[in-house]
């Protein structure tokens, strides 16, 4: 965070000659935890503190480095504290700040400790890591994941998605204009027909002349046919554009989701994401294919009819269009209201899908605890919410739509009254009046349609907003970040003072560990000690907050992510099988694998024989709604999957925890094949899984507490010995 | 990858069961040939399974076997395999639980009930497998090669 530009010069005026700024840290709370800015500055001689004052002079304090007893950092939930103890207890102080600044406070503290080690008065030539305001915007990604999408009107942004089809869109618009123009001819022809033929006929000034009727009839027929053709073309072209645009949106959304890190998916709920990809894009498709093109049509008709009306009789037109400003005002009032209602209805829909996405996969738990009624109630509430939000939209809408109709009737009434008077005065003929009335009723038809468009536009805008909200989340682990392409690794892994912070909580506190190629490391430790986090860091699902992980001597962050992941085999506690055949699932990481390789992998994973017994063999469908397989069988398929890609680095995350001991033995044999000759990190609660491990690493509270072989660790009688004893007691009980 | 003439020691005993002798000379009574990819590749990858379900041998290509052994295997496979090939679809009607399909297969005319959409699945290579409510599998090798009427009926449900 850059220091306040106002306070920094103030600090500089207070420096003594020869005094240099080493580090600075801006606090954002006061001791009562109210928002209040302050600036801590570390120089080569002193610690200075400058506090923002609402009126006038800033408060200033300073401590000589020699007087300072200790400076320490404490995390307190959503805030942090820097404690300062001094040789003179009355000079002690504390500073509070929000948790987002803890990392910077930590860096500041590191600078302080470093400065203290160097003799007083001597400036550290290379200040260890003066917080560089720019450096912190990169590679963090945790603090500002979901940026609110405030990048202009979401409907205008839809245009970006339409870009490849501008030609098609132009064609659609041309067809629309042509169709509108043709349909506007009808009243004109009708008016002429009345004045030239019907009125003279009625007033008996002329006899019936069929010859003169035929051209009118043909003209009317011709325009009808032409209008039909043009509208047909228009509808097709426009519907196609809508489908093209929304299909592109859906794909863009899904592609974007695939690029987002695990952290995003931990935060988001499945149902909501599905609703955004499914329903919201569909609403936009409806909007483009129906509402939008109608609107363009309407605007043309609206302008044309208004023009024609004024051409026929300006005064009459003025009278007829009298209610239009009122309608415009009504539309404006209703618009904002509809928009928020539609947004609420979209959210309610997403919430309802969340309930479904939660309950359907968890149906076993629901039934086991006999909580069907409760889930029904949960869904009822979600559905009730959908109902009431839609109801709110309808309430506004049902009031608004007839209102417009009423104004239409009012407009027509005005014309009939005013028209009768104008005709009586002999200013226009009856035919012209008929034509005028037809145009006016069309005009108001357009006004009504346009008002409907505003509702549709609000609904589409709400949907577009939900879509762009996902698209605007920046991929926090960009694959482009590391550019070095690599082939197969030898598998050396080095953790160099690795720290990892999630939010305000530091989960990994400085881990140093070298793993040789082909070595097997067993990670043990109580739950929550950071085992899985460490493994996730090694897979680069997350980036380290500080320190580095090196593979084959290169920083993990410099290596192309996909290339790196091709070197990693992952076997999880809960094996995930995709819907598809067993062969497809085994070859997931290497779709081009030959059948021979698939069978070899299955044999090595000791899955071959149970697959052989299935009716469809390797062609059996597994995954959701597929063949029922036991936990051990699923696990062995996932081991075969990891074996097939022949990874340099293998990660086993509690691979044997969810099965019985008999199956564990089977899996154990499969794992023995897998582990051979690979760098392996295995997490296990069952210590038997780790009997092949070269070294065991005991993690406690994000730190390594013990390293050694099974025998060595038993002798030290530390944490591992305790865990081992507990295991023995459980298995003998 | 065709290794010609693999040694597979297999014969039919007087009792009618298949007897397999492995490389070490151990004989196994009542062995079963099993297709590992019965739907996507029925002519390759045949495993010979012991009565207890252990894998004794794996044959990549039937064509590479001596004729008599191959015939023996095909005979045993034919005895166990039942995946009718659908040749034409006469009607698909709504039934109480799902849809009733009336079809002609390579094994004659039949009808069966398909419970839901997930019972019809595409396989690698463009063929489609249809599973009825009793878990019998029916295969459509190439949907495009069906006659026009059958194809139309299929398209309505798949």
Image (cartoon, coloured by chain):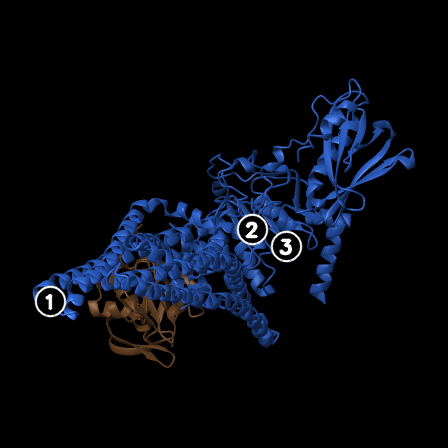
Front-lying residue, A111 or A442? A442
Label disc, if present, on residue A684 of the rendered structure: 3
Label disc, if present, on residue A264 of the rendered structure: 2
User: Label 3, label 1: how many angstroms apart (C-alpha)?
Assistant: 105 Å
Is B22 placed left or right of A423 in the picture?
Answer: right
Front-lying residue, A337 or A504? A337
User: Are there few (<14), some (14-19), or many (20+) residues within 10 Å of tag 1?
Assistant: few
Which residue, given by chain and number where applicable, does mark 1 sit on?
A: A206
Q: Is residue A162 visible?
A: yes
Disc 3: which chain? A
Dot 2 or dot 3: first in sequence order is 2
Front-lying residue, A244 or A530? A244
User: Are there few (<14), some (14-19), or many (20+) residues within 10 Å of tag 3?
Assistant: many
Label 2: element kind: helix
Chain letter, blue: A
Mark whose residue sits in front, 2 or 1: 1
Question: Where is residue A40 drawn, in percent x and y?
Answer: 76, 33
From this view, report whether residue A363 is shown above or below residue A682: below
Query: Which quadrant, please, contains the N terminus of chain A?
Result: top right
Q: Looking at the image, do the residues carrying marks 2 and 1 touch, with CB atoms under 8 Å apart? A: no
């Amino acid at each position: 965070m850059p220091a306040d530009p106002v306070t920094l010069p103030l600090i500089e005026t207070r420096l003594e000659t020869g005094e240099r700024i080493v580090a600075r840290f801006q606090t954002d709370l006061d001791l009562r935890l109210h928002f209040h800015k302050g600036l801590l500055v570390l120089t080569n001689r002193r610690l200075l503190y400058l506090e923002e004052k609402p009126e006038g002079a800033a408060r200033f304090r300073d401590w000589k480095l020699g007087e300072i007893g200790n400076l320490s950092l404490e995390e307190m939930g959503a805030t942090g504290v820097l404690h300062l103890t001094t040789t003179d207890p009355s000079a002690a102080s504390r500073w509070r700040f929000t948790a987002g600044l803890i990392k910077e406070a930590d860096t500041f503290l590191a600078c302080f400790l470093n400065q203290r080690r160097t003799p007083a008065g001597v400036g550290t030539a290379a200040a260890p890591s003066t917080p560089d305001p720019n450096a912190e915007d990169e590679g963090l990604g945790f603090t500002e994941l979901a940026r609110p999408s405030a990048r202009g009107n979401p409907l205008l942004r839809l245009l970006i998605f339409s870009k490849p089809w501008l030609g098609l869109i132009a064609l659609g618009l041309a067809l629309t204009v042509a169709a509108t123009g043709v349909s506007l001819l009808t009243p004109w022809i009708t008016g002429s027909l009345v004045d030239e033929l019907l009125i003279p006929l009625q007033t008996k000034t002329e006899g019936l002349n069929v010859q003169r009727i035929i051209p009118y009839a043909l003209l009317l027929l011709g325009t009808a046919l032409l209008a039909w053709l043009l509208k047909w073309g228009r509808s097709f072209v426009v519907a196609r554009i809508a489908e093209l645009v929304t299909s592109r949106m859906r794909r863009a959304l899904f592609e974007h989701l695939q690029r987002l890190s695990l952290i995003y998916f931990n935060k988001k709920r499945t149902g909501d994401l599905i609703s955004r990809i499914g329903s919201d894009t569909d609403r936009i498709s409806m909007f483009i294919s129906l509402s939008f093109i109608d609107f363009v049509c309407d605007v043309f008709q609206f302008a044309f009819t208004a023009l024609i009306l004024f051409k026929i009789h300006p005064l009459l037109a003025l009278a007829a269009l009298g209610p239009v400003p009122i309608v415009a005002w009504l539309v404006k009032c209703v618009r904002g209201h509809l928009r928020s209602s539609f947004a609420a209805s979209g959210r309610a829909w997403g919430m309802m899908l969340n309930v479904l996405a939660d309950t359907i996969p968890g149906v076993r738990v629901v039934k086991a605890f006999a909580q069907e009624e409760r889930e029904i109630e949960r869904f009822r509430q979600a559905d009730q919410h959908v109902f009431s939000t839609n109801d709110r939209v309808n309430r506004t809408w049902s009031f608004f739509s007839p209102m417009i109709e009423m104004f239409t009737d009012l407009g027509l009434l005005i014309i009939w009254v005013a028209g009768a008077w104008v005709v009586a005065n002999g200013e226009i003929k009856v035919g012209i009046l008929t034509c005028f009335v037809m145009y006016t009723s069309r005009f108001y038809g357009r006004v009504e349609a346009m008002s409907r468009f505003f509702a549709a536009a609000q609904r589409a805008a709400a949907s577009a907003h939900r879509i762009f909200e996902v698209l605007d989340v920046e991929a926090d682990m960009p694959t482009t970040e590391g550019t070095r392409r690599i082939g197969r690794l030898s598998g050396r892994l080095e953790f160099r003072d690795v720290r990892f912070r999630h939010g305000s909580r530091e989960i990994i506190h400085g881990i140093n560990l070298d793993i040789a190629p082909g070595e097997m490391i067993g990670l043990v430790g109580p739950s929550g000690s950071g085992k899985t986090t460490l493994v996730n860091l090694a897979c680069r699902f997350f980036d380290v907050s500080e320190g580095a992980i090196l593979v084959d001597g290169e920083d993990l962050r410099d290596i192309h992510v996909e290339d790196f992941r091709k070197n990693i085999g992952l076997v999880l506690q809960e094996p995930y099988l995709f819907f598809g055949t067993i062969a497809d699932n085994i070859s997931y990481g290497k779709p081009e694998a030959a059948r021979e390789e698939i069978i070899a992998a299955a044999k090595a994973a000791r899955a071959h024989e149970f697959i052989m017994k299935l009716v469809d063999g390797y062609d059996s469908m597994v995954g959701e709604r597929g063949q029922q397989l036991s936990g051990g069988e699923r696990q062995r398929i996932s081991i075969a999957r990891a074996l097939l890609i022949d990874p340099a680095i293998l990660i086993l995350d509690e691979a044997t925890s969810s099965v019985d001991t008999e199956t564990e033995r089977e899996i154990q044999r499969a794992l023995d094949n897998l582990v051979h000759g690979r760098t392996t990190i295995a997490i296990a609660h069952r210590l038997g899984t780790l009997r092949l491990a070269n070294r065991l690493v005991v993690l406690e509270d994000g730190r390594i507490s013990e390293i050694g072989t099974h025998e060595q660790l038993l002798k030290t009688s530390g944490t591992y010995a305790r865990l081992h004893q507990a295991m023995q007691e459980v298995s003998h009980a | 990858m065709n290794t010609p003439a693999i040694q597979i020691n297999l014969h039919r005993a007087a009792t009618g069961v298949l007897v397999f002798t492995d490389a070490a000379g151990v004989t196994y009574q009542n062995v079963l040939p099993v297709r590992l990819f019965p739907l996507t590749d029925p002519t390759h990858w045949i495993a010979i399974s012991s009565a207890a379900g252990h894998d004794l041998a794996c044959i990549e290509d039937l064509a590479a076997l001596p004729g008599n052994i191959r015939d023996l295997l095909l005979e045993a496979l034919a005895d166990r395999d039942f995946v009718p090939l659908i040749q034409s679809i006469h009607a698909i009607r709504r039934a109480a639980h799902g849809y009733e399909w009336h079809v002609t297969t390579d094994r004659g005319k039949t009808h069966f009930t398909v419970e839901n959409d997930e019972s019809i699945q595409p396989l690698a290579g463009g063929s489609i497998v249809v599973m009825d409510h009793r878990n019998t599998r029916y295969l459509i090798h190439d949907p495009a090669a069906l006659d026009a009427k059958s194809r139309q009926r299929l398209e309505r449900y798949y």
